Structures are given as C-alpha cells and as structure tokens.
Image (cartoon, helix red, strand yellow):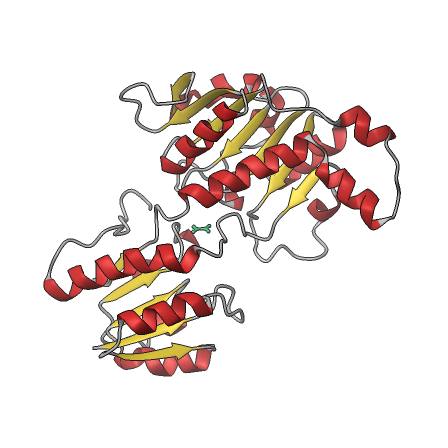
Amino acid sequence: MKFVIWRAYHLESKEITDDYISRIKKLLSGHELVVCEDIDTIKREVADADVMIGWRITPEVFVEAKKLKWIQFGSAGIDHTLFPELEDSDVILTTLSGIHITVVAEHVLGMMLALARRLDMAARLQAAHKHDRTELAATSTELADRTIGIIGLGKIGLNIARLAKAFGMHVVGIKRTVKCDLPNVDKLYPSDELDKILPISDYLVIVVPLTSSTCALIGPDQIDTMKQGACLINVARGAMVDHDALGKALASGKLGGASLDVFPTEPLPPNNPIWDMPNIIITPHTGASSARYGERAIKILKHNLEAFLTGGQMINIYQKERGY
Ligand code: OXD
C-alpha cells in the first residue's frame, strides 16, 4: 500500500511537522511512504497512492490521484480544502477533530487575559522602550465577574467554559442541539438565539465549525447589539465575521478589543487594514498549534489506519450533509 504526505498548508509552506512525520514513518513501517515538499512532487506521487496525509488537496492534485481511497487531513476543520469533485468522490475524508480541546481553550483564555491585562499595549510600549503607565493602567481590567459568551459549546467550547469558571466568570453560550444542562455553563441557548448572548457578553468567543449556517455569523447588525466595549475572539474561521464591520467597531470604541486567529483570506495580506486596528491581537492561525500536535494526531491516524486496513470503523469521517 502506498502512502503520501503532502506537507503544505498554504501551497508553498511545509507545515506537517518533523515530529508528526517521524511518528508516521514509525507507524507505517512496512508500507511505501513518500513525503512530498512541493506541488510537482505531490502531483507525481499521488498518482498511484492509496492514502494521502496532509493539510489540503487541490483540484489539480486530486485529478492526478487515480487510486486514492482515503485522505487523513491534518486539521479539525477541512472547509479550506473542499471542492465539489472531492466531496462527490468515494474517497474517505477524515479529520483530526477532537485533538485541539486543550490547546484552543488555553489559547482563548490567554487571549482574554491578554486583552483584559492589555498585554497588546504592553508589547507595543516595550518595543518602543517606553515605561509609560498612564494608558495601560487606565485600561487594564480583569476577568472575574465578567461574562463570556461562547458560540459553539462542543468539546472545545466546554473546556473554555471550565477554564473561564476557574477565573470567576459567568458563562453563557449557544449550541446547535440543546438537550440538557451543560457543566460550567450558567445559561445555554439554542443556535437561533444568538441575539440573547450578544448584549450580555463581555468576551464573545467563536468556536464553531464553518458551515452554511455559521458563515457570516457576526455582521454589522450583530456587532451593533453587542455590549459596549466587549471583546471578540475568533478561533474558528475568518468567514464568520465581517471584518469591515469589526474594524469600524474597534475604531469607534464600540468594541473594546479583538483577538483574531483566522481571516477571510489566509495568509492575511500585509496591507490589510485590520493589522493596524487599535486593541487587536493577531495570531497567524496558530490557535491550535502545539508542540504536542504530533503525539495527538498520531493516535487518530493509528486508529483510522487499523480500521482502514481491517474494515473497522474509522473515526472523524467528514460528513457532507453536516458540513464538517
Ligand atoms: C483546525 C485548525 O481546523 O487549526 O484544525 O483551524
């Protein structure tokens, strides 16, 4: 059986880590494995491969893949790499959903703390060698007794709720299916009641998969109803937030701050005005990055490989009708 790894996330990058690759090599010993660093190599090597491991596949690579039966993607969401021929094919698509529960929750807590403690301003003052307390002292606050609104109370959302509770926060949130009370959530709403959490959240966190119903979730109308001075944290997908409206709200002071890890276009172009918005912390889609990625990813790959080879039940199979 032939396996190929394509390392690229953005086409020219090499983002499947050395650590994950060495774990894959151990797991696949006895099978043919080719690691592809560039598009020409993957186009050539995918032609007779049975399985691909990677962050993405493009139509021009997929068209060459005559024998491909399974793609194990390197991310939890695969919206960035879907196209009709892929979704309509018989190739099994599996994700790494579930591996980011700890890291994304810690990232969100880190961002809320950074915004509350104004670490964005402290970093700018440090870069300018300015020991200037005035604005930093006047705008610093704390998380205790504030309300966090979590859009998406799946496993990551619930871990964020647990950590937020440890900081004395009030937790509200929305979830697609509301069947019972959830731990660490003070008030839970169904997803069509987003308007209930917008006016009461001091920190609004987006952590849902991108689907047709979550695309363009936060636009000018939603921002208008948000609490004055609230902060927005997006670790989901850029297409869920209208960035023009967000930029205006940050500039006018309607919103007190934002932390964005994801953008409508990635990489975020250097001339995009959002870089220079006041009170914003930008991370380049690293909200789920961790030195422990390989150790977690390999567990799902190992399970799925065994199931694939023995006809067992694979996990994290992408479901077209659900959109993730
Ligand atoms: C993912 C991500 O989907 O990091 O895994 O965004």
Quadrant hosting residue 144: top right
**Residue 151 is drawn in which quadrant?**
top left
Residue appearing at x 75%, y 45% in the figure: 276
Q: Is residue 252 left or right of residue 61?
A: right
Residue 58 visible here: no
Please report the residue visible at 24 percent of the width from the left and 63 percent of the height from the top. 91
At horizontal 39% and vertical 19% (from top left) the residue drawn is 188
Q: Position of residue 237 (x, y in %)?
A: 49, 45
Residue 236 horizontal side relative to residue 128, left or right = left
Task: Identify the residue at the far left of this view.
Answer: 311
- Rendering coords of residue 202 (x, y %): 60, 22
Q: Is residue 256 above or below residue 200?
A: below
How far across and how far down the image is residue 235, in percent?
Answer: 51, 42
**Residue 176 in which image quadrant:** top left
> Can residue 93 be spotted in the picture?
yes
From the top left corner, tell me how far across and down residue 240 is, in percent: 50, 39
Q: Is residue 58 left or right of residue 29?
A: right
Answer above or below: position of 310 versus 241: below
* 191 shown above or below 122: above
* Quadrant holding the N terminus: bottom left
Front position in the image: 156 or 229: 156
